[in-house]
Amino acid sequence: MYISSFIVVWLWAIVAELGLAANVPARRERHELTISECAARGGECDETKGRPVCGTDDQTYPSRCHLLRAQCSGYQVSLKYRGHCKACKDARDYALKHRSHGPPKFIPRCKSDGTYAAVQCLGDMGCWCSDITGKPIENTSVRNGKPKCREYTKANIRRSPSRHVSPSRLRRTCTAVDRAAFNANLIKVFQSEFMRAGAGQQKRGPQSGNAAGAMGAGESQNDRAVLDWKFTYLDVNANEMLDKTEFRELKKLVKRAVKPRRCGRAFGKFCDLDDDDRLTLTEWNDCFSKDQINRHAAADNKNYAVNSISDNNYQGFIPTTQQQQQQNINRNNNNNNN
C-alpha cells in the first residue's frame, strides 16, 4: 500500500515537472516578444529630434527616445517631466556666481529634487507662481506677500500651463434677450402644470393691484393668471411670500430644465430684489415683467458705463468744462425761444 502511494506521488511529480518545463519556453517567448516590441518602438525614434527629459532616476536624457531605449534595456526608469533635471539648480548656481552689487537680479528658488519651487520672488518687485520648469503662471503676481500657488501647481500637473480656455468656453452672462426667452420657456412649463391641475377651467377673481400694476407691455392676462396660480401653489403657508424652503424646488427645476440655463443659475438672485432670501408677490411679478427685465438691462449698462469711465476707458466721453458751459448756454437759449 505504501509502495503504491509512493508511485502515485512520484508520477504526479514527473507530470508537474514536465508541465512547468513546457511552460518555460512560452513565458520566455512572451518576454522576448515584449523586448522585441520595445526595441521596435525604440528603432522608430529619431534621437536627433526632441528636447531633454528628466527621468525618475533624476538623470537628464537628451530626448525621450533615449529614455525609451533605457527602459527597453531593462532599466527601471520612467518619465518624470520634460526638461533638465537640475535646471533650477544650474540656474541658481549661475545667478549666485554672477550676482553683483547693482540692482537685484533674479535668483530662483529650487526644491530638493532640482525643480523650481512654486513661489518665486524678486526683491521688492514682488512674488509670483511658477510651474516646475520655471515658467511664470499668468495673473499670479503680488506686490506684497506671497501668492497661494498650491491650486496652480496642481493644475499644472494635470495639463500644460500654456493651454488656455478659449473665449467660447467661458461662461456667458444672462442678457436681457436671454432673460426674456428664459421667462417665456418657464411660463410654458407653468402653463402645462396649470392645465394638468385643471386650474384653467376655474374662475379666478379680479387680479390684485400688485399683479395688475406689474404687468408689462405684451404680457397677456392668461400668463398673469398662470403666474398668480403658480405663486399661490408654492405659497404653502399662504403668507403671500415664498421662503427658501418653498422656493427651493423651483430653483432646482429652472437650473436643470429651463433654457437658457445661464439665466436659471441666477434666477433666484434676479428675482430677490432686496436679497432677503424671500420672494414677495411683487418681486415674483416683477421677475417675469418685461419692463422689469428692461430696467435691469438699463441698470447693468449704466453700471458698465460708470465703471468704464472710472477705468479711463471712455475718457473721450466726459465733456470738458468749456463743453459743459456751451451746452448750458444752448439749453438756456432754447428755453427762451420756447
Image (tube, grey):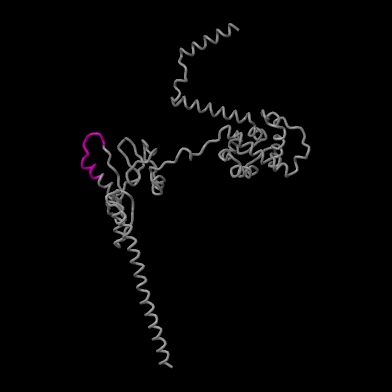
Residue 102 on the magenta segment:
yes
Report whether 60 appears left or right of 180: left
Residue 93 on the magenta segment:
yes
Report whether 203 appears left or right of 75: right
The x, y position of residue 109, in whole percent, is 30, 45
Task: Give the answer, above or below, for where 49 lies relative to 313.
Answer: below
- For the C terminus, the quadrant is top right
Task: Give the answer, above or below, for where 303 lies relative to 323.
Answer: below
The x, y position of residue 253, in whole percent, is 62, 44
Work out which residue is located at the far right of the displayed protein and give it: 203
Task: Give the answer, above or below, for where 19 lies relative to 60.
Answer: below
Question: Image quarter for residue 210?
Answer: top right
Report whether 229 appears left or right of 53: right
Instruction: Give me the residue at 70% from left, 32% from top.
Output: 220
Report whether 185 appears left or right of 167: right
Instruction: Give me the residue at 45% from left, 15% from top.
Output: 320
Q: Which residues, given as a range, are shown in magenta?
A: 92-104
- From this viewpoint, is residue 112 visible? no
The x, y position of residue 270, in whole percent, is 59, 35
